[in-house]
Image (cartoon, grey):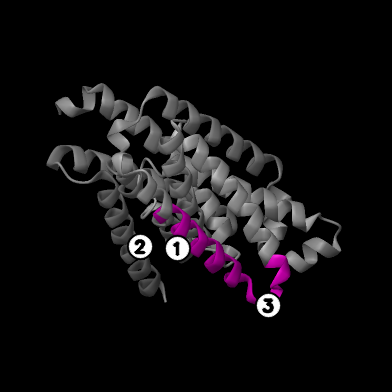
Amino acid sequence: MDILTAEFFQRALIGGVLIAVTAPLMGLFLVLRRLAMIGDTLAHVSIAGVALGFLINVYPVAVGLVFAIAASFAIEGLRRKYRSFAELSIAIIMSGGIALASILFTLGKGFNLNVNSYLFGSIYTLDYTDLTVIACVTVIVLAVVLLLKKELFLLTFDEDAAAVSGLPVRYFNILISILTALVISASIKIVGALLVSALLTIPAACGLALAKSFRQAVALVVVIGEAAVIAGLWMAGMWNLAPGGTIVLLLIAVLLGSLMTRAARV
């Protein structure tokens, strides 16, 4: 149990607990709006920003955040251009992000090992700067969701009705995309860009399988996210496993249990 007293593990636990609130919460809104793949897209674009950050010697997460926010604006712009093919915007931006990241990897061969930690997660290397960023993102996301919960609920379930009622749909769509970009940029060092989508979507899938109302779903996704992160970190630390992969496999196990529970109810 010595690992529980280790400073690096305590930093990892704090960062994981914070992001396990915001990532599943934003993931629920994305899943309900059929935009689950936006997590993968913004994560890949963030990696291009991280690579550029290493190349120009600027805090990588900050550059990744700028890239993710820019990508969120681009996705929303393309969604308006292709209203009947909303998923096309996600595919286009993801392709561009991967292409840009590959070029930056080629330019900066010396830092590729560091970038890999953002691809697969490196939660044990979180420092106090990382924790400050994650804490700020958590506060921003929770504040916006609490202040605009009614508007976000209406937009999520019926965008047309939201527009008719006078809600500035375009700006709220951009707001959701920016919040998602913030969460993903803060998450990639915890579970990695290749796995961050799982932290967004799998708790949402579990919550929707078990919940009887939207309010229940919100509570469940946060509880499931927290449980998976805390248990995954403990298991990874005790048995020397990859933390990001352990967390995601636990989430999949919870999802299977949720689906079996729902089937048993029928």
Q: Is residue 85 magenta?
A: yes
Q: Secondary structure at mark 3?
A: helix
The number of discs equals: 3
Task: From the image, state whether disc 3 or disc 1 is nearer to you.
Answer: 3
- Amino acid type indicated by mark 3: Ser
Name the spot of residue 231 as percent of width and height, x first. 27, 43
Which residue is denoted by mark 2 in the rendering? 255
Q: Main secondary structure of the magenta part?
A: helix
Residue at 41% x, 52% y: name it. 196
| Residue 193 versus residue 53 in the image, above or below | below
- Disc 2 crowd, CA 10 A, few/some/many (<14, 14-19, 20+): many
Residue at 72% x, 52% y: name it. 172
Disc ID at residue 84: 3
Earlier-in-chain disc, 2 versus 1: 1
Q: Is residue 162 magenta?
A: no
Q: Nearer the viewer, residue 111 or 185?
A: 111
- Are circles 3 and 1 on residues that touch, CB within 8 Å? no
Q: Toward which corner of the image does residue 81 lie, by quadrant?
A: bottom right
Name the spot of residue 54 as percent of width and height, x first. 40, 36
Q: Which residues are magenta?
A: 79-102
Which residue is denoted by mark 1 in the rendering? 205
- Gap in angstroms between the C-alphas marked 2 and 1: 7 Å
Q: Decide if residue 124 is on the left or right side of residue 167.
A: left
- Gap in angstroms between the C-alphas marked 2 and 3: 31 Å
Residue at 27% x, 22% y: name it. 7
Task: From the image, state whether disc 2 or disc 3 is nearer to you.
Answer: 3
Q: Nearer the viewer, residue 107 or 13?
A: 107
Disc ID at residue 121: none
- Are circles 2 and 3 on residues that touch, CB within 8 Å? no
